[in-house]
Image (tube, grey):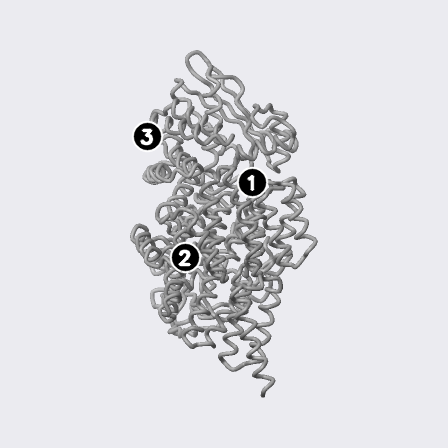
Amino acid sequence: MLLETPPRIRFEGYLIDRPAWQLQWQGETITLNRKTFDLLLYLIDHRDRVVPKDELLQSLWRDQFVEESNLSQHVFLLRKALSRHASEQKIIETVPGRGYRFAAPLEVESKSENRSSTSSQILVHASASVTEITIEDEEMGVDAPSYLLREGGARSRRPLWVAVGSLVVIVLAIAAWFGWQHWLDKSAGAPVDVVIAPLAGSTGDAILDSALVDALRMDLSQSPYVSPVTAARVRATLTEMKQDPNAAMNLTTATEVCERTNSQAVLHGGIARVGQHYLLTEEATSCVNGSMLAEAKQEVSTLEGLPHGIDKLAENVRRELGESRRSIARFDVPLFAGKTASLEALKAFTQAQVQSNQGKYVDAIGLMKKAVAADPEFAEAYYDLAAYSGSVLDRNNEREALLKAYNLRDTANEPTRLAIVALYHSAITLDLYEAERNYRNWTELYPRSAQAWNGLSIVERELGHHQDARTAAEHALELRPSVAGLYANLSYEQIHTGDPRGALATCNQAISKGIDVDYVREHCFQAAYALHDAAQVQKQRTWADTHPDAIYIRFDEISVAIAEGRFSDAHRLTPPLDGIMRRQGLLEPANGFIRDIGSNLVESGDVAEGISLLRSVPVDAKDDASVLGLAWAGDYAAAENAVHSMQAEFPQGTLWNDYRGPEIKAIVALATHRPKDAIQALERARPLEGRDPVISMLRGNAYLAAGQPGLAEAAYRKVLDGPDQEPEAEEVPLSWLGLGRAYAAEGNREAAIKAYGRFLSLWAHADANSAHLLEAKSELGALQNSRSIQ
């Protein structure tokens, strides 16, 4: 049933101005893309029921095939836009197994209509959406204008016929325009995942043969419709098949890879020399039944023209597989910007990728430098050069290559351009909000890109948006269920959204698939600890004992020891972990771990040992954890100078300006007995407070020191009650201690005694001489004595 809805609607403080196609919040326009706005209107118009997903897909993408993930992405964007109201009202409700419902009550805004009862006219109503225009004729009334009522022959009725004729022309023109648009947008079915087999035949140069296949893969990767299975995923699948991942596939092997990766087609072709010319061919066959899905060919007159021949061949393949003409026109950037491609650049690019796949980043860097020397406008090569340089912590070369890639970004295909912009804002401007916008654009254009969803998940985590990060991580893992890091990312976000049981299930799912690595086991350990599942905790410890190079569980053991006040255990466990990392050549990561452990010790009251650790490693003024360590170690001037320097260098840097800067300023202010300055500094960090519990705890400490125990209580409660609570974070027991002090300051002895008791239970195995333990016992004893006297 289509409900009648007025042109202007209010709900939960939002205003929809339907004629203007606008969504507003308190006078501010919220930007929505057209499809997301269409989704909102459709749910409102059918708000009396649950709207099935199939109905939404058919109504919003008429005559098009799109995957359900596309709808999920628009629901995600819509919920994000409708997240500003303060009430608990859920506006877009998911009904599992059925669909979505608009759940907010509408506040109808009446609008007077000055429609004369005596006037009569022909009205054209254009209900505009992406897919249709509706033309309606309203009845003429009895008091029509005189030229419409005049009796007589054709002469007297001419204005009416002119009007009707004009209307017909307009309608036909609109129909023709939409027909043309439909033709441009028409596709031949579902999107296609393809496995690319090597070319049969040869140019006489084996490296060039391989390079042409890579060029074809890059050309096809810009299509939102045809998705080539990545080379990394092909190698992983070949390894599962007990085959050499670096050996060339034949058609039979490629077909099995296609089946194992749940893809739809194998792309196989050849290259043949015909006189002085070359003939490139490609065929796409179904890996389900072997039927022919597409075939394309391209003739090239010279050897140097082969890369551009591959560009044209890829375009033909996309069209034959059913991609719409509009999509091909929009996403069809040649691999090389110039008219003449550099074969040397392409060959060096391919060889560099081979070396990087084997972990030989130094060799890959040398080859990629050769590629950009041969073609200084090769944007993809600069991007990979930046990535390889980052892998060996060569920040200067990473920055230089990334700046060049960014300057050339408009010459790259769309997914590469989006990747360049994302890395640019992550590594150069440090603007996480701009990176977030870029990743959202990327996921909307390429909803089947695991790289885009994973990048969005990571940037949402950095912003403290754990529910959004979890949703993106789920999409990424669904698309690439063979990648270990995606299991780790999802389980991390499940823990930080209050679902440790789900996190443990995700970890066990990875292990059951043979993905049994340190950084997956780490989240198994964390989830088991949050669930108080001693058997699972011990299971992960046993695994670590049998893997002497495992790092992350050992670090978690130290974090748990600190959180429980067992500082002597943390002291004992730290040197072995440091030694393991340094033996593996992980010098800077080892320094980072030492800084984290030292900061956590100081925060938890083990000040002398924490400061000793912090000062045992070099200071990196550009590393936020290092600068934080300066503040905890009492080097206040050095910490504040480093922050000011980084804020000047990165004026758009989200973390330096909106998180670490305020955090460090608050730590210094509290240490120098200026709690009001700490409160003021921490206000700027509110939007990022979900990153971890330290900001809320610091705010509680500042309010308590400023004599505002009620506000302190609320801040500590945010640490203890929030779904993003970190199970092994030292801020949890320390917030129970702070809460006890806040209740005591308010005169609420019973609540204070319970809070102190909770702290002491968490620190039941703490070192007997730890400062916070002694303070808590003394303060609790005073409260209990006061109650007994009364």
The residue beneath circle 2 is: 633
Instruction: Find the distance from the CA under tag 1 to the CA under tag 3.
Output: 39 Å
Q: Secondary structure at mark 1?
A: loop
Tell me the SS state at disc 3.
Answer: loop
Q: Is residue 302 visible?
A: yes
**Residue 631 occupies which quadrant of the picture?**
bottom left
CB-based contact (under 8 Å), mark 1 and mark 3: no
Q: Along the horizontal axis of the image, is 290 left or right of 33?
A: right
Label 1: few (<14), some (14–19) or many (≥20) C-alpha neighbours in 10 Å: some
Q: Which mark is residue 305?
A: none
Hey, what amino acid is under mark 2? Ala
In the image, residue 177 above or below residue 702: above
Q: Residue 457 appears at what percent x and percent y?
A: 50, 50
Report helix, strand or loop for mark 2.
loop
Question: In the rendering, at what x and y percent does residue 522 appear?
Answer: 59, 48
- The amino acid type, in three-letter code, at marker 3 is Pro
